[in-house]
Image (cartoon, rainbow, N blue to C red):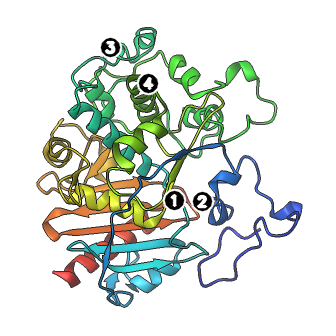
Amino acid sequence: MTRSYRNSDPALPIMQGAPPPSEWQLPPRDWDRAPWNRWSFQNIRACVPTENIAAGETALPWESAPQDLTGTGFTAFDGSDMTLSDLLDAYTDGFLVAHKGRIIHESYHNGMTRQTPHLAMSVSKSITSTTAGVLIDQGLIDPSAPVTTYLPELASTAWKGATVQHVLDMTTGVKFVEDYDEPDCDIARLEVASNWKPMPEGANPADWPATTWAQIMSLTECDADHGARFKYRSIETDLLGVLIARVTGGTLAQAISRHLWAPMGAEHPANVTVDREGTALADGGISATLRDFARFGQTMLDNGRAGKTQAVPMSWIADVRSGDHGRFDDESREFMPKGRYRNMFWIRDETQPIHFSLGIYGQFIYVSPNDDLVIVCLSTWPDALNDEQHSNVVRAIDAITAALV
């Protein structure tokens, strides 16, 4: 089995045939890994149960002014010369550049089309948190309030004493190990709890949480004081998703639809994976089309406005861009030396309003207000985390920005 294949390589016959040969059917524990992700990220509903995130009645139109950016050159991570065309060949599924409110580049690869939803992994965190931002503006959530105000059951967990803002900034002290290569750590257990993966062969069911909420309730240890440090932990977003569902009286998918997806003028429904209780995987389970992810970025760029609608409160946008909790960690500074993390967005430089929404396997929404620029990259890298591939996407973004200014 090849590790993966580039867009210029012959595609593997994953899930092809009626029925597909056994060797080309998705392995239940590795469907989200290479090479299977090249198919599964565009076909999530064949892999995991989902709930629809409805679009509104009217899609916000996009003006297009195509430019040929494929020859845009830059120095790659390894010191070689590289172009955007090379990057697009390297496991990219969709790439869109919007400058001054117009789409100037939009390309689809690996069988993806304008109508295809693509799994966004942790880009989902920014969409979930922004839905919370709308509810904060409506007075339904107070970021300074303890999370137990909304989820009193958490009084028996490590989140006791943490505020909603601690959760938004991932500065709670809750102990949660997120190592994608460790098969028995907390994030691996979340994959099982969220309905993404079966339990490992031979595992004792009593040792593995059956649902996302069960895992949240099982976390009773802190490894720091609340607010004392930043540490990236996906479970924080899943807790926020449950909190949103609780205060709105519905599901997270319904809240995202009502308070964000429809108001921002999405063209197509999105979807989010759900566990056995219907709890959404808020941290990484959202799939949507390339243009609709770009609409989310454009709404953030346009100070929360989508056409004539104030879809996202300006107070939320301002807090993402300039709110300062003063925490970051050495690991994150390796790729964002001047960065920080705010409201489940990555801030590239604390002196600039630029922000990223990032997901493993190569998902990016880049928003630069100073350059009036939104860039979205959807990918299926062979590795969940890869410094070289991440750097090359950022270098391509910087080269495109320089060429447009």
Label 3: which secondary element: helix
Residue 28 image point, x, y percent: 75, 48
Residue plotted at (45% across, 68% down): 389
Which tag, 3 or 4, sits closer to the chain's start? 3
Vertical placement of residue 213 versus 334, above or below: above
The reply to whether callout 3 and callout 4 are in contact (CB within 8 Å) is no
Mark 2–mark 3 CB contact (< 8 Å): no
Sequence-earlier tag: 1 or 2: 2
The residue labelled by disc 1 is: 361
> Which marked residue is nearer to the observer: mark 3 or mark 1?
3
Dot 3 alpha-carbon crowd within 10 angstroms: few under 14, some 14 to 19, many 20 or more: some
Question: Given contact means CB atoms under 8 Å apart, are the residues at marks 4 and 1 in contact?
Answer: no
Label 2 SS: loop
Q: Position of residue 18 (x, y in %)?
A: 88, 66
Question: Which comes sooner in the sequence, label 4 or label 2?
Answer: 2
Above or below, comparing residue 293 to residue 396 in the picture: above
Q: Secondary structure at mark 4?
A: loop
CA gap, disc 3 to disc 4? 15 Å
Residue 249's tag is 4
Residue 41 is marked as 2
Is residue 120 found left or right of 47 in the rendered image? left
- Point out the frontmost of discs 3 and 4: 4
Q: Amino acid at mark 4?
A: Gly
Tell me whether the residue at label 1 lies in contact with that at label 2, contact meaning CB atoms closer than 8 angstroms: yes
